[in-house]
Image (cartoon, coloured by chain):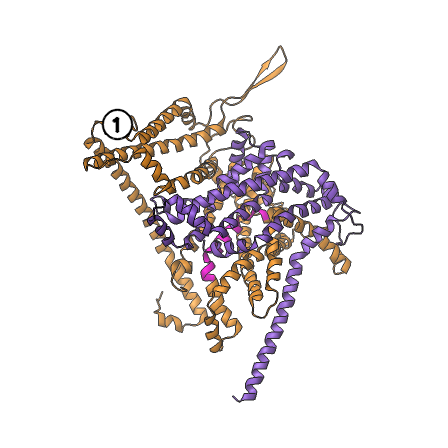
């Protein structure tokens, strides 16, 4: 092969990669647009004033904040929002403690029932969780934790079974070298001191990941929340409450309200998520895949 | 069938290779079944041997033990107390006292009612003076079943503790015989934050799982053998009782009105559930990987922006995005409106209502929208893994003249599949149980009138899990049927997991890529 040909081939490669890169850029722009369209629509529609039902066009004809004002004036929406916020906050705290306990124990200790316990949890995970709802509802009802008191009831349900979601953080703990534990133990630290003084500071990404996912989950839960609040608006979360606005008899008057509510619910969660995105990505790519 | 050696196999044509492997697979089924039966047999044999060993040990401990050990068989903790392990002794004794108290006060009652689930149902008596009915509520089947199961749990816990108590005596005797001191209560407490720290850590989570997951699941499995439903709620409307395998027979019977039976409905929904799970899993997987590869490609700018746009959609609660998208595709929604404005269609398309070809339109749309939901996750996961592929693999492939497609099928894809095998499996099973996407998008619509003869207003996009939910919320609320369906979901999911898991490359040959 002579020099000229070589150069031409090189140029050809560069040209073809430039073409493929621009194709990729176009594709990525299209993908981004597709992914953003629903959210753009929802924001635009939340400002629409001329009609409160669903319409066949995107850009509102009359703009204004009236939907937001009306929404924040609704005591039931405020109640749902506060409910969900409390649930999310408490859930984030308690669930993180439970999950970390579970995953640290399973990662660092080799006790007799360890294998059996992990297998049991795997088998339990194969059952449709939906089934347990019926009985949990009845039990919580006997305890007085449904309807108006659905908030503590829901927290109890979320937190109690959260130990089963230990996979991600156990995967992370497994990657922290055991020699660190042993060094500390030689220096006379108890296992508890090892956890608090050595492992936890190193496990910051996974702690934040656990808190973040535990905080986000209650915002989207519909089924359990609906069962336990049982048509009582005082105990509903945002998902259950706002679901009603899109049912056949309410959609024509509450559709734009739903859009405004969606925006108000999504903004804080999204901002929090974007701030902590780094940890989320680390958790998903680090622990979630290995299973 | 002829068995090929490795060399002969490699010389076969692609088609023959496939046939050969299929034949091998089917030939291996009887052996696999045999092995399974053998494994189950071995398990029971070992269990029986273990039980015999335990009994022998209990007997020998009693025979050889001193008087305190013997008393401990009745008064738990006696031996520990007498040997100076006050804390342990007190705990054992306290547990026994609580257990006996509970059994006398209520446990015995629940246990005795368990076989019948209640004898006296609700009744009403007429009061002629006030001209009203007085309603009386008596036995409560629901509570009997629940507390009956709880009592059985408690008994198992008691037997286990009793066994530990016996073992402790033996250990203490052995230690004392060898002349060493026993552990004091302080040592016990200290070990709970040190070498027994896992017990402290696990106490709360495991209790939670036992009460809020294991107990409900056992309860719901038992419900499948009763007639618990809206009109037999166990207390107010009437008792429920044991039915044996009647409900399973109902679900699998081919008899029914209009040529539609429970078995046919179940089969129909199961088929769609499997189709959905396959499509939902693999479309997301490959498209997500594709997007990740595009963003990762050298020379693509503002990688972070593309990633953030996609990741942002994870943050927005699904009930908002799914409900909204579902309304976008409604008959009077934005999609139809825009298409009409553009003049591409003359008539609004009924995405969620058209029942043509078994609701093909709605089914396809659900899968497409699920891609929209799922790609961001897959993109994140794939990005992490793709970056870990050693780049010298690609470089040597390039030198050998491999095309981009060859590199993908020979390096990227095998590597991805190897790492994400288990994830793919869990993804598949969780898609089978993907309640949120189906329920919030379509609610199961379009309605499948023929199948709706079976309870629960079945639709063409209904998965088993949403059908289960509908069964429990309808007027009749056939909890027993829901629980049979739930058990069947478990059986299907467990079977798939069992079969696939052991064939996963990352489980079978762990070392390949390390």
**How far from the left and from the top, in percent, is residue B8?**
36, 72
Picture residue at 32% right of the left edge, 45% below the top: B43
In the image, the chain rendered in orange is B
Magenta span includes B424: yes
**How far from the left and from the top, in percent, is residue B148?**
43, 29
Q: Against B87, is B366 above or below?
A: below
Tell which residue pokes out farthest to the front in this image: A187
Snapshot quadrant of residue B341: bottom right
Question: Could you tell me which quadrant the N terminus of chain B lies in?
Answer: bottom left
Query: Which of B425/A40 is in front?
Result: A40
| Residue segment shown in magenta | B417-436
Q: What hue does chain A carry in this figure?
A: purple
Snapshot quadrant of residue B90: top left
Query: Which of A44/B490 is in front?
Result: A44
Q: Against B403, is B417 above or below?
A: above
Q: Secondary structure at mark 1?
A: helix
**How far from the left and from the top, in percent, is residue B166?**
27, 33
Tag 1 residue: B82
């Amino acid at each position: 092969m002579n020099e000229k040909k070589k150069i031409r081939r090189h140029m050809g490669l560069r040209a073809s990669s430039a073409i493929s890169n621009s194709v990729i850029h176009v594709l990525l722009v299209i993908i981004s647009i597709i992914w953003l369209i629903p959210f753009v629509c929802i924001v635009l529609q939340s400002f629409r004033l001329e009609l409160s039902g669903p319409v066949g066009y995107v850009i509102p004809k009359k703009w204004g904040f009236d939907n937001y004002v009306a929404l924040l004036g609704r005591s039931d929406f405020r109640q749902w929002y506060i409910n969900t916020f409390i649930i999310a906050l408490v859930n984030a705290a308690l669930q993180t403690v439970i999950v970390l306990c579970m995953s640290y124990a399973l990662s660092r200790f080799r006790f007799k029932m360890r294998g059996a316990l992990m297998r049991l949890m795997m088998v339990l995970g194969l059952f449709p969780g939906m089934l347990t709802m019926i009985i949990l509802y009845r039990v919580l009802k006997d305890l007085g934790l449904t309807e108006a008191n659905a908030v503590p009831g829901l927290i109890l349900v979320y937190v109690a079974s959260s130990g089963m979601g230990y996979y991600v953080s156990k995967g992370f703990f497994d990657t922290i070298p055991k020699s660190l534990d042993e060094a500390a133990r030689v220096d006379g630290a108890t296992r508890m001191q090892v956890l608090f003084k050595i492992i936890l500071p190193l496990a910051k990404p996974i702690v934040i990941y656990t808190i973040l996912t535990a905080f986000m989950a209650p915002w989207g839960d519909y089924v359990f929340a609906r069962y336990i609040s049982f048509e009582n608006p005082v105990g509903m979360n945002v998902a259950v409450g706002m679901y009603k606005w899109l049912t056949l008899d309410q959609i024509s008057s509450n559709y734009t309200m739903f859009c405004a509510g969606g925006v108000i619910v999504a903004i804080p969660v999204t901002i929090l998520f974007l701030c902590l995105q780094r940890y989320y990505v680390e958790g998903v790519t680090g622990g979630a895949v290995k299973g | 069938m002829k068995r090929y050696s490795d060399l002969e196999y490699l010389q076969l044509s692609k088609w023959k290779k496939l046939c050969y492997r299929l034949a091998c697979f089917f030939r291996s089924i009887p052996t696999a079944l045999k092995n399974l039966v053998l494994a189950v047999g071995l398990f029971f044999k070992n269990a029986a041997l273990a039980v015999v060993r335990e009994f022998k040990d209990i007997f020998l401990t009693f025979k050889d033990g001193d008087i305190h050990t013997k008393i401990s068989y009745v008064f738990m903790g006696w031996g520990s107390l007498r040997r100076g392990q006050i804390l342990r002794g007190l705990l054992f004794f306290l547990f026994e006292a609580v257990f006996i108290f509970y059994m006398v006060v209520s446990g015995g009652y629940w246990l005795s009612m368990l076989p019948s689930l209640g004898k006296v149902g609700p009744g009403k008596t007429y009061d002629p003076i006030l001209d009203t009915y007085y309603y009386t509520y008596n036995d409560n089947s629901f509570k009997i079943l629940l507390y009956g199961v709880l009592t059985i749990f408690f008994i198992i816990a008691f037997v286990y503790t009793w066994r530990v108590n016996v073992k402790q005596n033996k250990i203490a005797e052995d230690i004392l015989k060898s002349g060493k001191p026993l552990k004091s209560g302080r040592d016990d407490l200290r070990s709970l934050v040190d070498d027994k720290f896992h017990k402290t850590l696990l106490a709360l989570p495991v209790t939670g799982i036992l009460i809020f997951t294991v107990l409900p699941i056992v309860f719901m499995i038992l419900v499948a053998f009763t007639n618990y439903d809206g009109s037999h709620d166990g207390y107010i409307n009437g008792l429920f009782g044991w039915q044996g395998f009647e409900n399973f027979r109902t679900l699998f019977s081919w008899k029914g009105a209009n040529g539609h039976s429970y078995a046919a409905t179940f089969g129909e929904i199961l088929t769609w559930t499997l189709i959905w799970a396959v499509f939902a899993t693999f479309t997301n997987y490959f498209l997500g990987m594709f997007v990740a590869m595009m963003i990762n490609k050298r020379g693509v700018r503002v990688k972070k922006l593309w990633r953030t746009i996609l990741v942002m959609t994870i943050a927005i609660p699904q009930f908002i995005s799914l409900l909204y998208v579902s309304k976008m595709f409604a008959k009077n929604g934005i999609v139809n409106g825009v298409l009409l404005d553009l003049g591409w269609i003359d008539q609004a398309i009924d995405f969620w209502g058209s029942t043509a070809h078994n609701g093909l339109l709605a089914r396809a749309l659900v899968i497409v929208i699920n891609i929209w939901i799922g790609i961001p996750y897959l993109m994140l996961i794939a990005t992490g893994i793709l970056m870990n592929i050693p780049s010298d693999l690609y470089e040597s492939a390039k030198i050998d003249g491999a095309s981009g497609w060859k590199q993908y099928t020979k390096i990227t894809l095998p590597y991805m599949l190897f790492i994400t095998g288990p994830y793919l499996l869990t993804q598949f099973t969780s898609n089978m149980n993907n309640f949120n996407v189906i329920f919030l998008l379509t609610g199961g619509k379009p309605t499948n009138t023929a199948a709706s003869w079976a309870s629960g207003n079945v639709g063409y996009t209904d998965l088993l899990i949403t059908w289960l939910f509908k069964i429990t919320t309808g007027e009749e609320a056939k909890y027993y049927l829901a629980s049979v369906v739930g058990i069947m979901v478990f059986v299907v999911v467990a079977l798939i997991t069992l079969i696939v898991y052991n064939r996963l490359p990352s489980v079978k040959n762990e070392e390949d890529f390390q």
